Amino acid sequence: MSTTAQSPLGLFATDDLIGEEDKAIRDTVRRFVDDRIRPGIADWYEQGSFPVRELAPELGRLGVLGMHLEGYGCSGTSATAYGLACMELEAGGSGLRSLVSVQGSLAMFAIWKHGSEEQKQEWLPRMAAGEAIGCFGLTEPDFGSNPAGMRTRAKRDGDDWVLNGSKMWITNGSVADVAVVWAQTEDKVRGFVVPTDTPGFSAPEIKRKVSLRASVTSELVLDDVRLPAEAVLPEVAGLSGPLSCLNEARFGIVFGALGAARDCLETAIRYSREREIFDKPLAAYQLTQAKLADMSLELGKGMLLALQIARLKDEGRIAPEQVSLGKLNNVREAIAIARESRTILGAAGITLEHPIMRHANNLESVLTYEGTSEVHQLVIGRALTGEAAFR
């Protein structure tokens, strides 16, 4: 006997926890993804390309670039609205959410939070509109989880700064107009606003990826890049600068990973209802329903966690370890949901006719960027014990 099917998050009635304005923003982003991203994302993934330059102005008109920032052409939305937007963007593809996260929560946030008024006026309005694209240079080939060991150096030469070094795994790098680059100085780590047409700056794109294929990933090379004194971010010195930006981006992942998981689970439910096996739908078998029930439980729990973290952020009470809780749990569970969903589709699940394997491959990158799971476990462990165990 069939009954009316519910959506996985409908079982948790999570919409009751979201304000009408935030839901309207979420629904607008969902329509954009359905209309603009879904028709092309499988081909982009297969080709290993992503039309960043074409999409950026559209994302600017949508209002999602730096949407949680105030002023300078930014929308000034709630953290909850930003999180929900990230969820819908990543339901389309992790590369799309990465583009928006790097633009708004890393490059733009760094300038907005730590930059001079001149830097803000020069870059933020154009970046919010998608007319200028930004990237964020922190990770190096040998220094990811330990950014304090970075080898990129900035030295004074008269009134100028001269930068030398390299950065790795930089989203948007080869299409960016501006890079926020972090470098060691004689004093502390400092951030620099680097126009990418500066002599000595290059950004070769990284190819042959099997994850985040529909995303631009690059190396940054700085070879005697000369910058004026006003290129430095004046309001911060030390690793607290880049780490504050990373915490903003991690918040978006807390929601974004759930978007990928939801897309996989909804695909599996739809397929199981349509696929006939031994003269009845796959959905009518106990083992299939047990899988769907378990996945829905983890998706709903992750959503409740995300909404609580967003509420804390909106109230100005968020702590870094709470963002780590969300990132650790939700990405880990999203990968598990993607893998389990694939089993329901069988061989059909490995093709790009369905989004599941694409999401699963992308989530492998999401698991380790913006802090590996191990790093987030240690952040949480430090909060629980008062002891730092990073070394």
Image (cartoon, grey):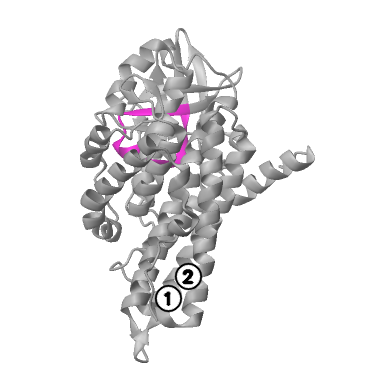
Q: Where does the N terminus fall, quadrant-wise? A: bottom left
User: Which quadrant would the C terminus be assigned to in this image?
Assistant: top right
- Name of the residue lying farthest toward the bottom: 278
Q: Is residue 13 left or right of residue 332?
A: left
Q: Residues within 10 Å of mark 1 (few under 14, many from 20)?
A: many
Kind of residue at badge 1:
Ile
Please say whether residue 312 is one of the residues in the magenta stretch.
no
Q: Give the CA separation, mark 1 to mark 2.
A: 9 Å
Q: How many marks?
A: 2
Q: Nearer the viewer, residue 321 or 43?
A: 321
Looking at the rendered structure, the secondary structure element under dot 1 is helix
Relative to 236, say whether 247 is above or below: below
Instruction: Using the image, tell me which numbered label, if any, was put on residue 306.
Output: none
Q: Name the residue located 55 percent from the left edge and 40 percent from the top edge.
A: 309
**Type of secondary structure dominating the magenta stretch:** strand
Quadrant of residue 181 in the image?
top left
Instruction: Please report the residue visible at 26 percent of the width from the left and 31 percent of the height from the top.
Output: 130
Q: Residue at x 37, y 34 (%)?
A: 103
Numbered tag placed on residue 344 in the rendering = 1
Q: Position of residue 93 (x, y in %)?
A: 35, 52
Q: Residues within 10 Å of mark 2 (few under 14, many from 20)?
A: many
Check disc 2 and give the amino acid type. Leu
Point out residue 94 in the picture as x, y percentages from the top left corner: 39, 50
Q: Nearer the viewer, mark 1 or mark 2?
A: 2
Q: Which residue is mark 2?
A: 292
Q: Which residues are magenta?
A: 164-181
First reached walking from the N terminus: tag 1 or tag 2: 2
What secondary structure is found at the residue carrying circle 2? helix
Q: Are marks 1 and 2 in contact (CB under 8 Å)?
A: yes
